[in-house]
Image: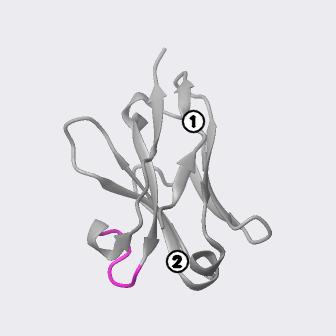
Amino acid sequence: VQLQASGGGLVQPGGSLRLSCEVPEYTFNNYALGWFRQAPGKEREFVAFISWALTYYADSVKGRFTISRDNAKNTVYLQMNNLKPEDTAVYYCARHNGGTYYVTGSYSYWGQGTQVTVSS
């Protein structure tokens, strides 16, 4: 099982994108989920986390990105506003298996990711 992220693209600085992650029903109903990103030449880094009751964000995206879940569609979203060139990366969603929420080792079922490019 992999979680498939979609919705990436090319956007100008200051623009917005909404990423989607379709999640198998069992996983959606029983696990927290997270978004990570990886820029060229850099390590994969935490972006946002959502459980049934909590959300967390990386400091670099706080106030600009919003993570949410649609229970009817088994989908997790990442609304990204006021995008900056440094947000350029491949974005991944993944299942949280427990443990520290901002550590990649706490997640599985990464999928292929979706490319976000912020450039004028």
Identity of the residue drawn at 51% across and 70% down: 33
Q: Is residue 58 magenta?
A: no
Q: Which mark lies nearer to you, 1 or 2? A: 2
Q: Which residue occupies the extreme front position in the image? A: 1
Report the magenta residues as a range. 97-103
- The three-letter amino acid code for the residue at tag 2 is Ala
- The three-letter amino acid code for the residue at tag 1 is Asn
Identity of the residue drawn at 55% across and 36% down: 8
Q: CA distance from mark 1 to mark 2?
A: 26 Å
Determine which quarter of the picture holds residue 40.
Answer: top left
**Which of 62 and 36 lies nearest the eye of the viewer?**
36
Q: Is residue 100 above or below residue 119?
A: below
Q: Which residue is mark 2?
A: 32
Q: Locate residue 25, reporting x and y percent.
A: 66, 75
Q: Which residue is mark 1?
A: 82
Given contact means CB atoms under 8 Å apart, are the residues at marks 1 and 2 in contact? no
Q: Is residue 99 magenta?
A: yes
Label 1 CA crowd tier, 10 Å (few <14, some 14–19, many 20+)? some
Q: Main secondary structure of the magenta part?
A: loop
Q: Locate residue 85, reporting x and y percent.
A: 41, 28
